[in-house]
Image: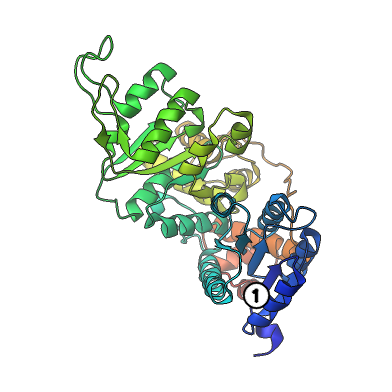
Amino acid sequence: MSQSDKPKLLVIEDDEGLQRQLKWAYDDYEVFVAGDRQSAIDLLRAEEPAVVTLDLGLPPDPDGVTEGFATLEAILKLKPDTKVIVASGHGARESAMRAISGGAYDFYQKPVDIDELGHIVKRAFHVHAIEADNMRLASVSPGSISVLGGMITAAPEMLKVATTIERVAKADVSVMLLGASGTGKELLARGLHDSSNRARGPFVAINCAAIPETLLEAELFGYEKGAFTGAVKTTEGKIEMAQGGTLFLDEVGDIPLPLQVKLLRFLQERVVERIGGRKPIPVDTRIVCATHQNLDVMTAEGTFREDLYYRLAEIVVRIPSLAGRAGDAGLLARHFATKYAAAMNPNVKGLAPDALAAVDRWTWPGNVRELENRMKRAVIMAEGRLVTATDLDLPASAEEDDTAEVINLKAVRERADRLAIRRAVARTEGNISNAAKLLGISRPTLYDLLKQYGMQA
């Protein structure tokens, strides 16, 4: 195998002796070495390695982890599918949890065991290849709909989320879903539960922001008869009700500090005491939680306990906004149009071209929830057979703002091509001839582009 045919591995390590050792250890890969953040980012842009090993102790903070975590964040911002394997001798467990929560693929502790690291690197390349194949298979076809929890998507960004959730579902760890309101966090939580070994147990959800602070403790932990005025009978809390299943804490960032302490105790001891009770009750349940708030800021400000955060966020899954899911807005719009037309206005048979264009161009600050609500209202109010942009109360045209940071010029061109192709194919419901006309190219040219980018017709 020539050097150019080998998978690319980037080693970020400031110790020159260890640099040489790691570079010589991996004959199966084309190895690039960087000793600091900037040279690592330069190599990432130029070579686009699938796997990176990262020493957290980088200059100018070789005895700490600040620069290492900044490098991890920069890598995943530029190339989110990169498998980053983090190493550190500095507070290993705490750093490991933080790194995995921040998107790292895996972790190992110094001093380096070359054989152990070799197995981790090999597995990382294998997982990256599988995910890349899955993305290619589902990157454009309107029929590529993930059924995880009933979620509908053909966007690679969301399919990657679904793949991640399916992977962690079997591992009995706490999962934190981070995303803006309306992105489908509860739907994904249900999908995680249904894919887990606890699927036969109950899925119990509670919105921590929707219940007054004075009642939230009773809702979570339950109460004994006579514990307070109005407690006319002994009542199980949501935690007990989730015995053998999954407890979903939505908007967990809204739990008040005093109750955070009690929740932390449950997570540590796995027993609850009802209000007014004295008997500890063992509960075996998995915790999945979600929030739209920035818990890193809240922990820094002292409004959310850091120890609780690390208990809840053993695995963190970040959910993209609808605006970040190219092609999904049109796909979902047609789905909701069909759904609500059948129930509320059978005369509606679909969406007009100006409606599809408006849906594609709108930024959807309220995400999928906003889209569903607009479609529901539009179907009810539509007078013709097709829902129009006016029915949706959307402007007929809008300027797109694409300011996301990109890794290099090749990626800019590819992303623009992929975006245009996905939207055209989605808008023409998979008709390649019509999609080619919409794009202003010939049918053979479109097939060539689909083949070039590994996209499914």
Q: Nearer the viewer, residue 154 or 408?
A: 408
Determine which residue is flagged by label 1: 452
Q: Nearer the viewer, residue 107 or 240?
A: 107
The residue depicted at 29 percent of the width and 51 percent of the height is: 198
The residue depicted at 57 percent of the width and 36 percent of the height is: 295
Task: State the residue lying farthest toward the top.
Answer: 229
Tell me the quadrant of the picture where the C terminus can be found.
bottom right
Residue 349 location in percent, x, y? Answer: 45, 46
Tell me the quadrant of the picture where the N terminus can be found.
bottom right
Q: Is residue 378 left or right of residue 22?
A: left
326 up-or-down from 257: above or below? below
Per the image, label 1 sits on a secondary structure element best described as: helix
Residue 197, quarter of the rendered image: bottom left
Q: Is residue 170 visible?
A: yes
Colour pattern of the rendering:
rainbow
Q: Nearer the viewer, residue 386 or 57?
A: 57
Q: Nearer the viewer, residue 241 or 455?
A: 241
Residue 342, quarter of the rendered image: top left
Residue 446 location in percent, x, y? Answer: 64, 71
The residue depicted at 51 percent of the width and 58 percent of the height is: 159
227 up-or-down from 455: above or below? above
Q: What kind of residue is marked 1? A: Gln
Residue 269 location in percent, x, y? Answer: 35, 39
Q: How many marks?
A: 1
Residue 90 location in percent, x, y? Answer: 63, 54
Q: Is residue 81 visible?
A: no
Q: Classify mark 1: residues with Cα within 10 Å, few (<14), some (14-19) or many (20+).
A: few
The residue depicted at 51 percent of the width and 51 percent of the height is: 331
363 up-or-down from 124: above or below? above
